[in-house]
């Protein structure tokens, strides 16, 4: 089976994941904009918002890269790059949230949320690396990472809305 044939088998999954992610990004912006001053004043809320946006963004970009009719090595390079950018965007937020004296989420909740996101970013990077050699396990890793990112992001969004609404 060729890479293009395998990718076309996952086309609908990635279209749905990308659509859900883009929709949820919009809802996140609307929800956070209602209490923007609180989000801006608290580094833990800002960090959680940033990692949640990065999660949704990574799902969206993974979905886009996987539905573009291109070669295996191009998709692999794009996945690795997107995972690395997501890591670079979220690490400073994690450090700021941990150091925040006005943190509303417990440390283990922050580490769990950021940690699961970080592991998912690494899974996307790993899937990109696998895609350079063999595409079958790469799709499995991408699907797992996508589902985890969506689940964690939904939970983060709920926590953000409850935290800033209180």
Image (cartoon, rainbow, N blue to C red):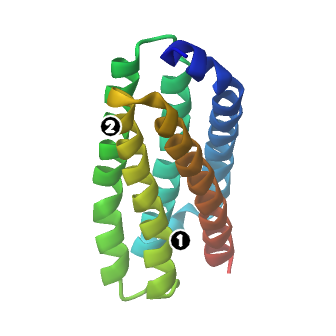
| Numbered label attached to residue 129 | 2
Q: Provide residue 2's location: percent of width, then percent of height.
A: 51, 14
Tell me the SS state at disc 2: helix
> In the rendered image, which quarter contains the N terminus?
top right
Residue 95 position within the rendered picture, expressed as x and y whole percent measured from the top left: 29, 72
Q: In the rendering, at what x and y percent does residue 103 appear?
A: 45, 84
Image vertical order of residue 131 relative to residue 56, above or below:
above
Q: Tag 2 or tag 1, which sits nearer the N-term?
A: 1
Disc number placed over residue 22 in the picture, else none: none
Q: Nearer the viewer, residue 140 or 52?
A: 140
Image quarter (top left, top right, bottom left or bottom right) of the C terminus = bottom right
Front-most of 146 and 136?
A: 136
Helix, strand or loop at label 1? It is helix
- Examine the rendering and report whether any part of residue 57 can be seen: no
Residue at 48% from the left image edge and 42% from the top image edge = 58
Q: Residues within 10 Å of mark 1 (few under 14, many from 20)?
A: some
Where is residue 133 shown, x and y percent of the image?
34, 29
For image coordinates 63% across by 41% down, the residue present is: 21
On residue 38, the disc is 1
Which residue is rendered at x = 65% and y = 66% of the image? 155
Q: Residues within 10 Å of mark 2 (few under 14, many from 20)?
A: some
Would you say the residues marked 1 and 2 are in contact, meaning their CB atoms lie under 8 Å apart? no
The quadrant in which residue 72 appears is top left
Q: Is residue 12 left or right of residue 1?
A: right
- Does residue 47 appear left or right of residue 164 in this picture? left
Residue 44 location, quadrant: bottom left
What is the distance, in whole Å, between disc 1 and disc 2 at their CAs? 40 Å
Residue 86 in view, yes or no:
yes
Q: Which residue is located at x 48 percent, y 65 percent?
A: 116
Q: Nearer the viewer, mark 1 or mark 2?
A: 2
């Amino acid at each position: 089976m060729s890479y293009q044939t395998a990718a076309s088998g996952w086309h609908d999954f990635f279209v749905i994941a990308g659509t859900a992610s883009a929709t949820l990004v919009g809802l996140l912006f609307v929800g956070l904009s209602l209490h923007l001053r609180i989000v801006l004043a608290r580094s833990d809320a800002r960090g959680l918002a940033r990692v949640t946006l990065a999660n949704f963004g990574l799902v969206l970009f993974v979905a886009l890269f996987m539905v573009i009719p291109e070669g295996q090595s191009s998709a692999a390079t794009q996945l690795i790059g997107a995972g690395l950018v997501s890591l670079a965007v979220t690490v400073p937020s994690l450090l700021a949230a941990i150091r925040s004296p006005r943190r509303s989420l417990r440390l283990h909740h922050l580490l769990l949320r950021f940690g699961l996101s970080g592991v998912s970013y690494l899974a996307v990077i790993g899937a990109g690396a696998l895609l350079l050699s063999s595409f079958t396990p790469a799709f499995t890793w991408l699907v797992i990472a996508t589902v985890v990112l969506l689940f964690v992001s939904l939970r983060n969004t709920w926590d953000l809305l409850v935290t800033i609404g209180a």
